[in-house]
Image (cartoon, rainbow, N blue to C red):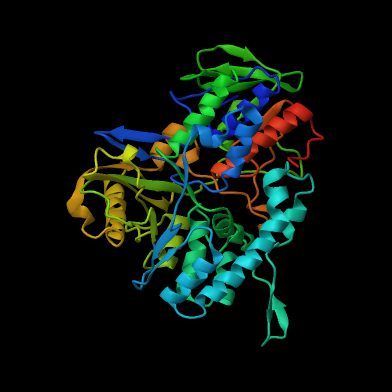
Amino acid sequence: MIGAGMGAMAAAARLAVAGHRVVVYERTDTYGGGVRRLERDGFVFDTGPGLLTLPAVYRDLFVKTGKEPLEDCVELVQVDPSSRHVFADGTEVALPNASRAGVVAALDEALGAGAGERWGEFLVRAREAWDRTRRPLLEEPLWPNWRVLAEKEPYPGVPQRRLLRTRQARTLSEIGAWELRDERLATLLESSALAYGLDPRTAPASAAVLPYMEHAFGTWYVRGGIRELARAVYERCLQRRVEFVFDAEVMRVLDKDGRAAGVELRDGTVAEADHVVADVDPARLKVMTDRPLDKNGDVRADPFTTRPGRFTVLLALRGGREAGAAHRTVVHAPDPESELDFLASADGDQPPPPTVTVLRPDDPALRADEGHESVVLSAVVPSAADWDEESMVRQYTDHLLDAAEAAIPGLRDRVLWHEVRTPDDSDDETSAFLGAVPAPALAAGQGRFLHPANTTRLPGLYRVGGWSHPGGGLPHAGMSGALVAGLIVEGPEFRGSQ
């Protein structure tokens, strides 16, 4: 196993239960991939994902790999409200967790009568897209005839009385413009794609499944931070006698008689294996193999394509968290078009203010005492920008702090200290090209939003984690582990969980 990310560990635990001896070689000194934490002066911060959707993926992992269920290993808490949104015109709305009626009522009250109904009708259509794509995009290995997924848009068309025909949205932005008919509702919709670095102007309409997943399955937090989920998965691996070797960088996948036969480490050590599972991004895997991994007609990933990353500011604040504060607040950009243009090109010396997510967990484990608070600010940014340039880092830090003032009035006066993390830090920790963050796989879009299959052209070599099917995000990484384990244990005939 190359890498100790969430997908690799999910596969490792399942393979160990199936009787395989599993050894994980991790380049850094810890597990979890991008799911990490920073501790300083009694403050604790998640430096990767801060929330969890689809916890059923990890519940299934724990059921299949041991007697202790997930909830005996971590404390899962539903976040309510699921999110608070501050729009550019100053309008605010707090959306209840996993309550359609509650969300409809909240939107009607905040944005005007009819807004909630339009959003509710959108969720019905998003559910249809989810039902059509859930199995092929999450629960099954990528179809050999994946072009069926790439060409057909699963998001349904909407009858237009005036036009006497059905209008089929092709992109997420078209759903906002044609169906939601409110700039703030459109911004709410588009932010679900932007959070994964997807441009809603080009993301297929099938990206409607992203807000639907949060709505239908809820938004969850793990007490102590999401890093506790990584710890629980790691400990489950240890219980199943998975071996971990840290500070061990794999340089090459061994190829013997046309089959993956093990790995070679930086120090020259060779470890033979019947199967090799790689939880690394395409650029790094290409260097390790130096041979084509995809057959003609396969989904291919350009290993050196530039994808967005994340810019994060970790804040240690004096003063306690006020009662009723939202766990997550999204402060939307004042000029969304400029934000998306800069994200796509990284051109210009003056980056526009981005959409900023403010995470304020009500968790004593994350703060020094009741008189302090730990807060995480984050925004999606161009990973190809010059993050060694001090002025760029300073401008983005100021943008995030300015936006966070809308969520936490008087924020700057409370700051004891802060730490900044750029895509360069993600690059160091995960080796992802330029510190990019993978997005979940999506149907339609001519296949540009699918990820390469878990199997490769080299027999015995498998891909796992966010850079392979079914893509990025904690649930998707966990599901990729289940798919790879199934393919190794049951062989090519494996068709996914039933």
Is residue 64 shown to the viewer in this render?
yes
User: Where is 27 relative to 269, above or below?
Assistant: below
Q: Residue furthest bottom?
A: 162
- Residue 89: horizontal and vertical position, in percent? 35, 73
Q: Nearer the viewer, residue 145 or 264?
A: 145
User: Where is 357 relative to 271, above or below?
Assistant: below
- Residue 86: horizontal and vertical position, in percent? 37, 65
User: Where is 375 relative to 209, above or below?
Assistant: above
Q: How many marks?
A: 0
- Residue 272: horizontal and vertical position, in percent? 65, 14
From the viewer's perspective, tell me whether residue 308 is left or right of residue 302.
left
Look at 68% across and 49% down and name the residue there: 137
From the viewer's perspective, tell me whether residue 102 is left or right of residue 151.
left
Q: Residue furthest left?
A: 413
Look at 67% across and 25% down and name the residue there: 15
Q: Nearer the viewer, residue 452 or 74?
A: 74
Is residue 384 shown to the viewer in this render?
no
- Residue 24: horizontal and vertical position, in percent? 57, 22
From the viewer's perspective, tell me whether residue 200 is left or right of residue 259.
left
Look at 48% across and 28% down and name the residue there: 31
User: Where is 122 relative to 463, above or below?
Assistant: below
Image-quadrant location for residue 110: bottom left
From the viewer's perspective, tell me whether residue 270 is left or right of residue 131.
left
Quarter occupied by the C terminus? top right
